Structures are given as C-alpha cells and as structure tokens.
Image: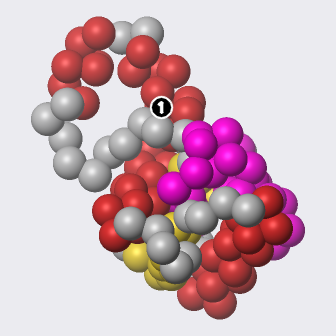
Amino acid sequence: MILMKPTVSSDTAAQLVARAVGHAEKSGWRVAVAVVDAAGIALALRRMDDVAPPIAEFALDKAFTSATMQRTTKQFFDRMNDAPSLRLGFSNRSRLIVWGGGLPLFHGGFCVGGIGVSGAEDFEDIACAETAVETVGLSWSR
C-alpha cells in the first residue's frame, strides 16, 4: 500500500515566513519564524536581526510540535496542563514545546505542515503566525 499525503510547498513556506516577519516588523516585534512540512522537516527559517540564536530553535520546535501533533502549541499546553501524567512524560521528549506561537497548517482537511514564531510575547507570536496562515489561504484547524 502507498500513502499519498499532501504537504506544504517550499514556495508557500517562504511566503508564510515573509508574511509573519512582515507582521512582526509592522508591530515593532523581533522574531524568528520557521515552517516545516507535514513530517516536521524544516522548509524555511528566518531569524530577524538582533534576535538571539536560540529563538530560531524555539521557532523550529514550535513548528515541529504543531505539525506532528496537529494542534496549536497553545492547545497542546492546555491539554498538558490538565494531565499531570502527560506533563511528566512530556518532560522527557525533545523538540516538543508548548509555548504559544506554533500552528499546524491544514488544507483540505489534511495537516500539511506547521509554522512556529518565537521571540515576542506568546500572544504576539500567535498573531504573527495567524496573520501569515490567513494570508496564504491555509487554516490552523481542520
């Protein structure tokens, strides 16, 4: 059997990064933005000037978490916050992160990737990601 699963293109990933950065610039925020495919593999990354290097890794991890878990990092936090055993197990997993700013990318009911924004306040990171997703015609929910 062969599975055929759609995934976000590298061109769309570049557009998402550009639009998230544009929103951050307009708002006076300094961020890093990452987009990954449906398997969590990086397609595009930009770290704005004067953003600390670890922030780019946080953005990648937010995108990875959202794509592979098929939920926002905020939703993942809410789920973990209600489940002590899940929270305990989570602490041993690399790359999964629950800070706000990660959104899955859905198209036609399929999760095709994830976007992660990091460097500003959580709600500001989320705003950058949501703006980018809306402007390219994708969704962060099924």
Residue drawn 74% across the image and 50% down it:
127
Q: Is residue 106 above or below residue 56?
A: above
Q: Residues within 10 Å of mark 1 (few under 14, many from 20)?
A: many
Q: Is residue 117 above or below residue 10?
A: above
Direction from residue 41 to residue 45 in the image, left or right: right
- Residue 72, horizontal then vertical, whole percent: 57, 41
**Residue at the disc numbered 1:** 76
Q: Which residues are magenta?
A: 112-141
Vertical position of residue 57 compared to residue 88: above or below: below
What's the residue type where badge 1 is placed?
Answer: Phe
User: x, y (%) of residue 77?
Assistant: 46, 27
Q: Is residue 48 left or right of residue 17?
A: left
Quarter containing the N terminus: bottom left
- What residue is drawn where x is 65% and y is 90%? 11
SS label for mark 1:
helix
Picture coordinates of residue 106, whole percent (x, y): 67, 57
